Image (tube, grey):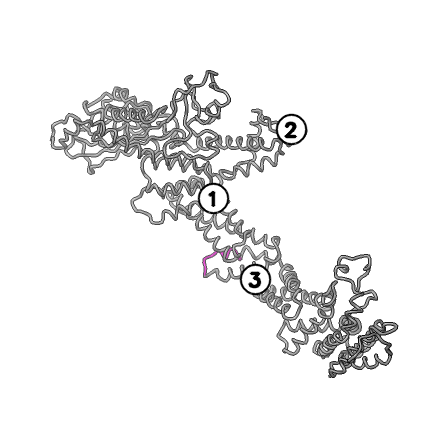
Amino acid sequence: MSGEDCDAFDRGDNDGQKPDKMFTLKKWNAVAMWSWDVECDTCAICRVQVMDACLRCQGESKKDSYGKQDCVVVWGECNHSFHFCCMSLWVKQNNRCPLCQQEWSIQRMGK
Amino acid sequence: MMSLKPRNVDFTETWAHLKETVAGVVGLRAVERSVWNTRFSDVYALCVAHPEPLADRLYDETRNFLEEHVAGLLQRVRGAAPLDHNDHNDGLLTRYVSAWREYSQGVAYLNSLYSYLNLQHVKRQKVSDAEIIYGSSATVTCPEHDARQLEVGELGLEIWERVLVKPLSAALTGRIVRGLAAARGSAPDPAFASTLREAIRSTVQVRAFRVRAPLALYQALVLEPYLAAAAAAHAQLAADLLAAGDVAHYTTHALAGLEREVALGARYLDSSSAEAVRACYERAAVAAHLPTLHATVPGLLREAAAEPPASTERRADLRRMYTLLRPLGPAALRPLVDAAHAQAAADGQALLAQTHSKDEAHTHFVNAMLTLHGKYSKLFSEVFGGAQAFVGALDKACSAVVNSGGAAGSAPELLARYCDCLLRRRAAADADVDDKLAAAIVVFKYVDDKDVFQKYYARALARRLIHQLSASMEQEEAMINRLKAACGYEFTNKLHRMFTDVAVSADLNAKFQQHLRDHNLATSTGFFIQVLQAGAWPLGGAMAPLAPPPQLERPARQFEAFYRNMFSGRRLAWLHHLCSGELRTRYTARQYHVAASTAQCALLLSFDAVDSWNARELRDTLQLEGDAWGRQLRPLLDAGLLLASGDVGTEEEEIPPEARVSLNLAFSCKRTKVRVTCASAPAQGGGAGGGGAAASDAGDAAHCDDDRKMYLQAAIVRIMKQRKVLRHTELIQEVVSQARGSFAPSVAMIKKCIEALIDKQYLERAPAALDTYSYLA
């Protein structure tokens, strides 16, 4: 299935003689599932699964715009994660992680 | 030529002249212009006479004269005919009408002659309309009965009524009623018709000047006696009709009778009576026989439901019946509506019960429902003019039939299967798929358990999307949008997300291929990946564990790296049980293309370098655990691609771990494409983590129940948060109305949810009232 496979394209003319590979992988339809790489799969602020849009966004019936979710996840330095929408409202009142009370600073954003 | 100045007038002399002219005017004899002018002046002179105005005396004398005159007319009208028999042709009506014509005309002229008296003398005394209607201190009694003076024209009419009509009233009434009865049977000769009409109109005109009860005389003299007589006649007619023949006979003639009656009323009676005439007929001829009519309705409906032309007559009967009953109000129609409902429901059950093959249960179900709906919509709009009550009855019947459940399965399941079959790619393209899907929405709207439908539909959609079985993405999207239009955003949210994932994946594949080309990593393997978002797909939890061989591992790793680069904070999990691959054999004389599941591909690829494996070793290498091992390996053995030494038993048994599995180098098959089918069979998905794909119905129902409870609890909390305090019945009502969009909740389930919320301290029973809840913030 690598480059060599393509070169050794010697088909069925090897009567009786055993080829080095018995099979060629012609096609592979793979299916994978992605999820946010989080420790806890519910957002502690709105109690909705982080894979779903947060409560506010659901209320406003926002659609996922082609692939990129509007309602992404954000990780703090403490490694706790929340909906970005929820957290940005939260920090306006209290700049600490609601779970561990550490000063909130963003480690990374989901994309 | 004459002085307007008041002067001394000799009343007796002037009145003698005036009286002569008045007699001439009232008798419609020729009066010369100059005489008319002189008499006009005489009236003026009398009114302004000096020293005492003589208006009152003139008025009284005029009244006396008119009374005498009318008394004379009375004699003329009465003639020699005896009054106590009611022969309408005895000439009394004719004489009456001719006298009335003459007199009413004459009095109208007289009114002009006396216009000065009217204007100056009477008007001043007259009370205004407003005073008559609303009353005032000055007018305590009815103006008609006190001694107040009337205008001369009105005086004449009043005298006519008092002196002539009163003594003749019974005779007139009797003749008019008889005359009308005769006119109902057959059209009278034009002369008599106009006599009758004028006689009736005179009773209106004689009181037309009155503000209060202008129609009282007409009503007492004509309308009421007529209606009483007519009611008896109608009742007799209806009874005769019902006795003489069936309902068809009755409705036809009763409706014709109604038209005749309305026409008769319009021709002879005052226009204000049209409603009363119609109501009288309906009461006497229709309402009195309601029970008899209602009893025939179910039978009529049954026959009308047959295909035309056989049913054309019955439909016409029903239409006439409806026309007759509609004015009688909803209560009279109720049995019709109930019968319509019963008929549609019974027909629906019969349609569902028709024999059909098991595989076609879903098509049969949807087609039966569409037939039912189409047939009765058409019938009801044809027969009942599409009246709201009947549309409602049809809706109720359809909903009852749809949700009745049958041997073939529940409505949501059958409907979802129907949609699935239409949306799948098939050999023969169906031209009217769009129409059929749109029609399926008609049935969908009647389904109570829409949430169950959603689960079935989502699962079928997932299968179609993952295995690329959809006939067309446009159709898929259109169908999701139809469901959304019927049930709202929330209902199709997940379906939309699944759909979006597929579109995103296509984009992602293109980018990945570009990435491979850019980095010279391209291979001959057709690698295609779908990346699904967790949470939106009904795929169940557990993944099939598999340690893929390097041939599969490599593109997977490449893609993971690429994906990590594109996104951040995301985790990828491979759903091997949903993947499939295609291998080309290189060791056989003919080339074979083998399509199989990932695990089977992995099994085959393990023989790339090794001809035979110890079964246990092979299993451990690939980490195929539990029954997945047997399930994946067995079809390969059955297809003859692999051989197993020793006794490997039959289908059901375990493959012994000591057995040796080897590649069948002499594999041959008629076709060059070998599909190892078992992979996509439902049994495969079952255990190996495709849990959702083919879970048992029992587990499914439980899952659905849980979802419903959550939904109901959320609804209760929402309602209570808003209302704070609410009675039990009202709360139940509100919850039911909120849930109706997706399912019909049972009261018992709502009660359980309320209990649960009380336990969780969201609610409490209000301390004062037994059946009231209050919200705990």
Label 3 is found on which chain of the structure? B
Q: Amino acid at mark 2?
A: Ala
| Residue bearing mark 1 | B445
Q: Quadrant of residue B36?
A: bottom right
Would residue B640 be seen by someone viewing this image from the given angle?
Answer: no
Pick whichever of labels 2 and 1 is earlier in the sequence: 1
For the residues labelled 2 and 1, the Cα–Cα distance comes to 38 Å
Q: Residues within 10 Å of mark 2 (few under 14, many from 20)?
A: some
Q: Quadrant of residue B8?
A: bottom right
Q: Is residue B657 left or right of residue B175?
A: left
Pick whichever of labels 2 and 3 is earlier in the sequence: 3
Label 1 is found on which chain of the structure? B
Local secondary structure at mark 3:
helix
Residue depth check, mark 2 versus mark 3: number of the one nearer the observer: 2
Residue depth check, mark 3 versus mark 1: number of the one nearer the observer: 1
Residue at position x 50%, y 62% from top? B313
Q: Is residue B42 left or right of residue B246?
A: right
Residue B302 lies in the magenta-colored region = yes
| Residue bearing mark 3 | B247
Residues behind callouts 3 and 1 on a single chain? yes
Label 2 is found on which chain of the structure? B
Q: Look at the image and give the residue range highlighted in magenta.
A: B300-308
For the residues labelled 2 and 3, the Cα–Cα distance comes to 60 Å
| Residue bearing mark 2 | B766
Q: Amino acid at mark 3?
A: Val
